[in-house]
Image: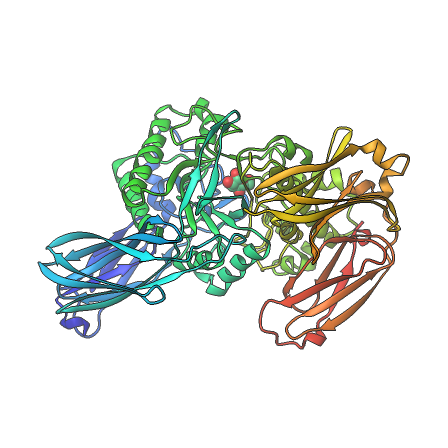
Amino acid sequence: DLISKQYKQLTFFGIDTFASVYLNGSKIIEANNMFHPWESDLNNILKLGENIIEIEFRSPLKEISPKLKNLDYALPADNDQAGGMSPYIRKAPYHFGWDWGPCFITSGLWKKVQLIGYDSFLVNTINLNQLKIDSKRGELEIELEIISKNSTKATLYIIEQSLEFEREFILDINKGINNFNKILKVLNPKLWWPSGYGDQHLYNFNIRIKSNDFDMLFDKRIGFRTAKIIREKDSKGKSFTININDTSIFSKGANWIPADSFITRLKKEDYRFLLESVVKSNMNTIRIWGGGIYEPDYFYELCDELGILVWQDFMFACSLYPADKQFLKSVKNEASYQVKRLKDHPSIVLWCGNNEIAWAWHNWEWKEKLPRHLWEDYKLLFHKVLPEVCKKHDPRRLYWPSSPGHGVDAPETGQIYGSGDNHYWGVWHGGDDFEAYEKNVGRFMSEYGMQSYPELSTIKTFTTSKDRDISSAVMTSHQKASLGNKNVIKYIEKYYSKPNSFESLLFISQIMQAEAMKMAVESHRRNMPYCMGTLYWQLNDCWPGASWSSIDYNKNWKALHYAAKKFFKSIFVSIKQKNKYIGVYVINDLNEIIDCDLVIELLNFNGEKIQSHIESLKLKPISAKKYFSTKVKTLIENKNKSKIVLKSFIKTKERILSENHFYFVRPKDIDLPEPKFNIKYEALKDAILIIIIPSTFLFKVYVTCINCKGIFSDNYIDLFPGEEKKIKFKPNDNLNIDIKDLMFNVNTMYDLV
Ligand code: BMA
């Protein structure tokens, strides 16, 4: 039992943030960083019977404010709603507020606490580094860190059943810190692939360390794969392509923020819902943005299982940071711990130093207004401390200093299009029209976005009926962006007709957001392989409010998430007008040849084909190509532009792979007929089919479920007369309601304006 062990160690895996920990009245820990564990040898303090642990948390603001009094400059922290102290505190930046989230400066224990006893040594870390991998063999390195009180011997056993792999080693352990590295060679491993490119084979290594007074089992699950970021010089700059198992991956996805303002509220099923939603919408990548937290193990385990590639930022965003010895040491501890904790996950493809700080220095007037030494401090943290940690613990993964960024050296300028990754905010922050996405395409688009409101059911959770107006005090407190409501309205007015009610405004904001992101992603994808990645801002929310998310806080897919499912399909058709010409492009981001037919039809709203064109295609692997081009005038002749649509789809013998529609006017100028349709329902075992049979053209038909939460197979779609559409609705949780009692609303754009 514990007390009979010679040594005892108490570990707090997460203390948020400034706290003193006492055991039986003696101080054992003084914490100031929420991102790494704090531990203490209890030695003689722990006694048999009752022990008292007291933790005294101190206000982060009060802790820091006296230290700032003598500074003659303030570190920039534009999103900080609590007075700008966040850069000095190793605590989730978004806790101080962001342009999509409230300021809740939490305190408390946010991870598990562990008390262990031992007689001679402790296993601190176990990693399985991948040295060489292909389908014939895998060369791993097991890396152990053992902390020992004396010299002893132990045996290390490693077993992987499905590979029929078994090895054992004798470990000569010395007093102090011991590092062991042993090579393991396995035969014929099945490779791990990102979603859409192959299966996610994972292997469980059982590791046992045994000596006369120690016997412990550890499990390590890994996937065999190589991961590189290819950066090749060409006439346009330098590429930025994720490459897995020697295959170029077109990276599709979104940016992830912490899924709650109060992290400890999150359950495994919340993570599962969100990450399953990622793959359900045909994404293969997420970026864990640097203003949040290093996510829990479970998060990365799910990414491994689901085949989601992870771009992992260190937790620094949109601020400058101190560079005193103590701060740098704290960051070094944090980064070393996190890299060692996470590096075995096949899903993680790169480490990134920070979000937008280098860009901000050069382009947000920081350089002009702030003392020059702050840039030296920046370089110390992001070009010395962090890359050294990565090089030491994970030399095979890329360390990318900042997003956006164009190289690994400290940049002399802000963003460059043509090299590295880009954040394009001309649409939204800059006020540009959606069409501007076309002209702002980089090698890897890691941020761009458009806001919308969550649906009414979510808004009802924090409003009473009198608050349901976007300018009410309650609604504005749930809109944290400075341009906020004004911008949403501005973009709606540019493209859509005036919503006829508060609820209609919510829907139209989502439809508008989906359209903006569709235009962005299509322009990125048409530019493949020049552009090899597109991650919109942002996947999720940390509370219910207006934001750039595609899934709201209450787990509702917004119109954007349904659109993403379509615009992220591997084989994809895209229609684009450039000046007087209209072109139809087909994109294949898979590493295989695809035989298919491309169909292009010009239709009027009665569903009559005015023109049509069909062509057999052999799509090259990883290709985007214009297969059809014509003058708009030749195509539409004297037809009324407001009453026609160009429809295009790609099909194989079995099915339609992708379908897209192009309107010749903005949505507000489309001459919508009054919608007429019939609906039928068909109950399945765990889902229900909603069958829509239109007798007129329907623009943006959307279905909502009145008495249950769930996901539709498709939503916000355009239908032509006679084109029957089946939409499957699957409730999120186990139903406590009979499938047959579910109630739905089916509406269209016509009802919103
Ligand atoms: C990007 C992000 C966030 C922010 C978003 C919207 O720059 O990195 O800082 O929430 O823009 O403004």
Asked whether 151 or 3 is in front, the reply is 151
Q: In this view, does 114 lie to the left or right of 193?
A: left
Residue 377 visible? The answer is yes
Scheme of colours in the image = rainbow
Residue 125, horizontal then vertical, whole percent: 26, 56
Residue 525, horizontal then vertical, whole percent: 61, 40
Asked whether 180 or 18 is in front, the reply is 180
Q: Is residue 683 above or below residue 264?
A: below
Residue 233, horizontal then vertical, whole percent: 46, 28
Residue drawn at (36%, 28%) of the image: 374
Q: Is residue 45 above or below residue 569?
A: below
Furthest toward the right, the residue is 638
Q: In which quarter of the image is the N terminus?
A: bottom left
Residue 6, horizontal then vertical, whole percent: 12, 66
Number of marks drawn: 0
Residue drawn at (68%, 73%) of the image: 684
Residue 18 visible? The answer is no
Furthest toward the left, the residue is 151
Q: Is residue 374 left or right of residue 217?
A: right
Q: In this view, does 331 lie to the left or right of 610?
A: left
Q: In this view, does 124 lie to the left or right of 342?
A: left
